[in-house]
Image (cartoon, grey):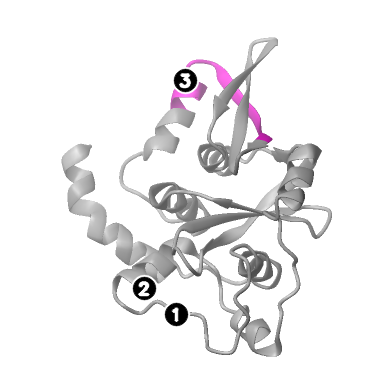
C-alpha cells in the first residue's frame, strides 16, 4: 500500500466538479478523485483550519467514535470499479480491528480530522493508470505552467464560479484529459497557502441555514 497525503482540492475544468488530489508521501504519484461539493467543503474546512461554531457531520462522527471507545486507526482506498473508488475505515475496538465500507471523500475528511494515515492499495493506482485516471504530473506548455502556480482550493473556486469569476481555459492550450491539470496543480501548488478568505465567506453565506439545522 502507498501512504498518501492531501495535496489539495481543485475543480474539473470542464464540469466544475470538485476534485480531491492525493499525492504519494514518498514519491510523485498523484491520484485525483472526483467528489461532491459538500464533501469538498468538509475537507477544505480542515485544510484551511476554519473554526466552525458547531460540529459538522464528520466532526460528530469522529467524536461519536471516540466517546464509544472506538479509535480510527487509518483509512484505505481499496478498489476502483467502473470509475468509482471504494474505501474502508480501519477501526480499533479494544484489541479487535474492524473495517467499515465508506466513500473515499468521507474517509479522507475523517482522516484529516483524526490525523491518521491515508493508504491507497497498489492495484488501485495501477487500475487508475490503466484507465487513464491517474494523469501525468508535467504541465503541457509554459503558459499552462504559469497558470498552475495558482493555489488550488475547490471551495474557493466554487465561490468564484458562483459569482461569475471562474477562470476558463485560455485559448491555445491543448484540451487535456480531465485529470491532467489536477495533477499539475497538485505538484506545483500543494505548498501554497489556501484561499481561506473565500472559503470563510462561503461559510458565512451558509450560516443562517446551518443555524436552523443545528
Q: How many numbered markers are drawn?
A: 3
Do callouts 2 and 3 mark residues in contact (Cβ within 8 Å)?
no
Give the labeled residue for mark 3.
67
- Foreground mark, 2 or 1? 1
Query: Splitting the image into 4 quarters, where does residue 174 fall?
Result: bottom right
Residue identifier under label 1: 167
Give the vertical position of 159 relative to 2 (above or below).
below
What SS does tag 3 mark?
Answer: helix
Q: Is residue 202 left or right of residue 36?
A: left
Q: Position of residue 50 (x, y in %)?
A: 42, 56
For marks 2 and 3, give the CA distance. 39 Å
The percent position of residue 9, horizontal first and vertical second, equals 54, 60
What segment is highlighted magenta in the picture?
63-79
Sort mark 3 into few (<14), some (14-19) or many (20+) by Cα contacts within 10 Å: few
User: Which is nearer the N-term, disc 2 or disc 3?
Assistant: 3
Q: Is residue 78 magenta?
A: yes
Q: Residue at x 39, y 70 (%)?
A: 197
Amino acid at each position: 500500500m502507498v501512504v498518501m497525503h492531501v495535496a489539495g482540492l481543485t475543480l474539473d475544468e470542464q464540469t466544475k466538479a470538485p476534485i480531491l488530489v492525493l499525492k504519494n508521501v514518498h514519491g510523485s504519484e498523484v491520484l485525483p478523485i472526483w467528489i461532491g461539493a459538500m464533501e469538498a467543503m468538509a475537507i477544505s474546512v480542515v485544510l484551511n483550519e476554519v473554526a466552525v461554531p458547531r460540529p459538522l457531520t464528520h466532526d460528530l462522527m469522529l467524536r461519536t467514535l471516540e466517546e464509544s471507545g472506538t479509535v480510527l486507526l487509518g483509512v484505505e482506498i481499496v478498489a476502483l470499479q467502473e470509475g468509482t473508488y471504494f474505501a474502508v475505515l480501519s477501526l480499533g475496538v479494544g484489541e479487535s480491528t474492524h473495517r467499515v465500507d465508506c466513500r473515499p471523500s468521507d474517509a479522507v475528511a475523517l482522516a484529516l480530522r483524526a490525523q491518521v494515515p491515508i493508504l491507497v492499495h497498489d492495484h488501485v493506482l495501477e487500475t487508475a493508470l490503466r484507465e487513464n485516471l491517474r494523469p501525468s504530473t508535467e504541465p503541457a506548455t509554459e503558459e499552462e505552467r504559469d497558470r498552475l502556480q495558482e493555489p488550488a482550493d475547490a471551495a474557493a473556486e466554487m465561490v468564484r464560479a458562483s459569482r461569475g469569476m471562474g477562470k476558463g481555459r485560455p485559448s491555445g492550450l491543448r484540451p487535456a484529459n480531465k485529470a491532467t491539470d489536477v495533477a499539475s496543480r497538485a505538484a506545483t501548488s500543494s505548498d501554497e497557502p489556501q484561499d481561506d478568505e473565500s472559503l470563510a465567506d462561503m461559510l458565512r453565506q451558509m450560516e443562517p441555514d446551518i443555524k436552523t439545522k443545528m
